Image (spheres, rainbow, N blue to C red):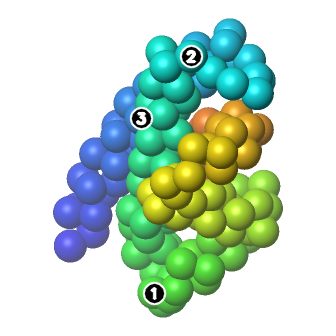
Amino acid sequence: MKDLHLELLKNELTLLEDSAKILSRSFQRCQDIGHKKEYSLEELDHFEGLTSRFARLSDILIQKTFRLIEILDLDLPGTVRDRINRAEKKDLIRSAQLFVEIRDLRNDIAHEYLSKKFIDIYQKVMEWTPVLLETVQNVKKYCERYIK
Protein backbone atom coordinates (compact mmCIF):
# COMPACT_ATOMS: atom_id res chain seq x y z
CA MET A 1 0.00 0.00 0.00
CA LYS A 2 2.85 2.38 0.80
CA ASP A 3 4.26 1.91 -2.72
CA LEU A 4 0.92 3.03 -4.12
CA HIS A 5 0.96 6.14 -1.92
CA LEU A 6 4.51 6.95 -2.95
CA GLU A 7 3.56 6.64 -6.60
CA LEU A 8 0.57 8.91 -5.96
CA LEU A 9 2.89 11.39 -4.24
CA LYS A 10 5.26 11.47 -7.21
CA ASN A 11 2.31 12.13 -9.52
CA GLU A 12 0.99 14.78 -7.16
CA LEU A 13 4.33 16.57 -7.04
CA THR A 14 4.47 16.62 -10.84
CA LEU A 15 0.94 18.04 -10.94
CA LEU A 16 1.89 20.67 -8.36
CA GLU A 17 4.98 21.69 -10.30
CA ASP A 18 3.06 21.95 -13.59
CA SER A 19 0.24 23.92 -11.96
CA ALA A 20 2.71 26.25 -10.26
CA LYS A 21 4.44 26.99 -13.58
CA ILE A 22 1.16 27.88 -15.25
CA LEU A 23 0.04 29.99 -12.28
CA SER A 24 3.40 31.76 -12.22
CA ARG A 25 3.07 32.63 -15.91
CA SER A 26 -0.42 34.06 -15.40
CA PHE A 27 0.76 35.93 -12.32
CA GLN A 28 3.59 37.59 -14.27
CA ARG A 29 1.21 38.61 -17.03
CA CYS A 30 -1.20 40.16 -14.52
CA GLN A 31 1.65 41.90 -12.70
CA ASP A 32 2.48 43.57 -16.00
CA ILE A 33 -1.14 44.76 -16.28
CA GLY A 34 -1.13 46.11 -12.73
CA HIS A 35 -3.94 47.29 -10.47
CA LYS A 36 -6.65 49.38 -12.10
CA LYS A 37 -10.18 50.49 -11.39
CA GLU A 38 -11.29 49.20 -14.78
CA TYR A 39 -9.83 46.59 -17.10
CA SER A 40 -10.16 45.90 -20.81
CA LEU A 41 -11.84 42.65 -21.85
CA GLU A 42 -8.47 41.15 -22.71
CA GLU A 43 -7.08 42.12 -19.30
CA LEU A 44 -10.15 40.62 -17.62
CA ASP A 45 -9.48 37.39 -19.51
CA HIS A 46 -5.94 37.33 -18.11
CA PHE A 47 -7.18 37.90 -14.56
CA GLU A 48 -9.88 35.28 -15.01
CA GLY A 49 -7.19 32.79 -16.01
CA LEU A 50 -5.11 33.79 -13.00
CA THR A 51 -7.97 33.36 -10.52
CA SER A 52 -8.92 30.01 -12.02
CA ARG A 53 -5.35 28.74 -11.79
CA PHE A 54 -5.01 30.12 -8.25
CA ALA A 55 -8.17 28.28 -7.16
CA ARG A 56 -7.00 25.07 -8.84
CA LEU A 57 -3.58 25.12 -7.20
CA SER A 58 -5.04 25.86 -3.77
CA ASP A 59 -7.41 22.91 -4.23
CA ILE A 60 -4.61 20.60 -5.29
CA LEU A 61 -2.57 21.60 -2.24
CA ILE A 62 -5.32 21.46 0.37
CA GLN A 63 -7.59 18.74 -0.91
CA LYS A 64 -5.10 16.35 -2.44
CA THR A 65 -1.47 16.94 -1.50
CA PHE A 66 -1.90 17.77 2.18
CA ARG A 67 -4.27 14.80 2.51
CA LEU A 68 -1.75 12.47 0.88
CA ILE A 69 1.01 13.76 3.16
CA GLU A 70 -1.25 13.03 6.14
CA ILE A 71 -1.65 9.45 4.94
CA LEU A 72 2.10 9.02 4.51
CA ASP A 73 2.75 10.60 7.93
CA LEU A 74 0.15 8.26 9.47
CA ASP A 75 -1.97 11.17 10.70
CA LEU A 76 -5.64 10.56 11.39
CA PRO A 77 -7.91 12.10 8.76
CA GLY A 78 -9.74 15.23 9.80
CA THR A 79 -11.47 18.31 8.52
CA VAL A 80 -10.01 20.77 6.04
CA ARG A 81 -9.16 22.99 9.01
CA ASP A 82 -7.32 20.07 10.67
CA ARG A 83 -5.40 19.47 7.45
CA ILE A 84 -4.41 23.14 7.24
CA ASN A 85 -3.35 23.23 10.91
CA ARG A 86 -1.17 20.15 10.41
CA ALA A 87 0.39 21.69 7.31
CA GLU A 88 1.39 24.70 9.41
CA LYS A 89 2.92 22.46 12.11
CA LYS A 90 4.94 20.68 9.41
CA ASP A 91 6.14 24.05 8.03
CA LEU A 92 4.46 23.39 4.71
CA ILE A 93 2.64 26.72 5.02
CA ARG A 94 3.41 30.03 6.70
CA SER A 95 0.12 30.44 8.50
CA ALA A 96 -2.96 28.31 9.01
CA GLN A 97 -5.10 31.44 9.21
CA LEU A 98 -3.80 32.69 5.87
CA PHE A 99 -4.61 29.33 4.26
CA VAL A 100 -8.12 29.44 5.70
CA GLU A 101 -8.44 32.83 3.99
CA ILE A 102 -7.01 31.37 0.78
CA ARG A 103 -9.62 28.60 1.00
CA ASP A 104 -12.36 31.22 1.49
CA LEU A 105 -11.01 33.17 -1.48
CA ARG A 106 -11.09 30.01 -3.58
CA ASN A 107 -14.78 29.64 -2.66
CA ASP A 108 -15.41 33.29 -3.58
CA ILE A 109 -13.76 32.70 -6.96
CA ALA A 110 -15.98 29.69 -7.59
CA HIS A 111 -19.22 31.36 -6.51
CA GLU A 112 -18.90 35.10 -7.19
CA TYR A 113 -20.89 36.57 -10.04
CA LEU A 114 -20.80 40.32 -9.32
CA SER A 115 -18.20 42.00 -11.52
CA LYS A 116 -17.50 44.72 -8.92
CA LYS A 117 -16.45 42.07 -6.40
CA PHE A 118 -13.92 40.62 -8.84
CA ILE A 119 -11.61 43.63 -8.49
CA ASP A 120 -11.20 42.76 -4.79
CA ILE A 121 -10.70 39.10 -5.67
CA TYR A 122 -8.02 39.99 -8.23
CA GLN A 123 -6.13 42.05 -5.63
CA LYS A 124 -6.15 39.22 -3.10
CA VAL A 125 -5.08 36.68 -5.71
CA MET A 126 -2.19 38.92 -6.71
CA GLU A 127 -1.19 39.26 -3.05
CA TRP A 128 -1.45 35.55 -2.20
CA THR A 129 -0.16 33.88 -5.36
CA PRO A 130 3.45 34.10 -4.12
CA VAL A 131 2.31 32.31 -0.95
CA LEU A 132 0.93 29.40 -2.99
CA LEU A 133 4.08 29.23 -5.10
CA GLU A 134 6.24 29.23 -1.96
CA THR A 135 4.09 26.45 -0.51
CA VAL A 136 4.71 24.27 -3.54
CA GLN A 137 8.44 24.58 -2.89
CA ASN A 138 7.93 23.78 0.81
CA VAL A 139 5.91 20.68 -0.08
CA LYS A 140 8.56 19.47 -2.53
CA LYS A 141 11.26 19.88 0.11
CA TYR A 142 9.15 18.13 2.78
CA CYS A 143 8.42 15.20 0.48
CA GLU A 144 12.09 14.55 -0.20
CA ARG A 145 11.98 12.33 2.90
CA TYR A 146 9.65 9.97 1.02
CA ILE A 147 11.08 10.18 -2.46
CA LYS A 148 14.76 9.45 -2.79
Marks 1 and 3 sit apart, C-alpha to C-alpha, by 25 Å
Image location (x, y in percent) of residue 132: 62, 43
Q: Residue at x 40, y 75 (%)?
A: 71
Quarter of the figure that contains the C terminus: top left
Marks 2 and 3 sit apart, C-alpha to C-alpha, by 26 Å
Residue 88 visible in the displayed image:
no
Q: If you read the primary sequence from the N terminus, does the residue marked by circle 2 or circle 3 appear first?
A: 3
Mark drawn on residue 19: 3
Residue 143 vertical placement versus 108 (above, below): above
Q: If you read the primary sequence from the N terminus, does the residue marked by circle 1 or circle 3 appear first?
A: 3
Q: Residue at x 68, y 75 (%)?
A: 85
Q: Nearer the viewer, mark 1 or mark 3?
A: 3
Quarter of the figure that contains the N terminus: bottom left
In which quadrant of the rendered view does residue 64 lie? bottom left
Question: For mark 3, does the 10 Å Cα neighbourhood hold few (<14), some (14 to 19), or many (20 or more) residues?
Answer: many
Label 3 SS: helix
Q: If you read the primary sequence from the N terminus, does the residue marked by circle 2 or circle 1 appear first?
A: 2
Mark drawn on residue 141: none
Mark drawn on residue 40: 2
* Amino acid at circle 1: Pro
* Amino acid at circle 3: Ser
Please report contact status of discs 1 and 3: CB closer than 8 Å, yes or no.
Answer: no
The residue carrying mark 1 is 77
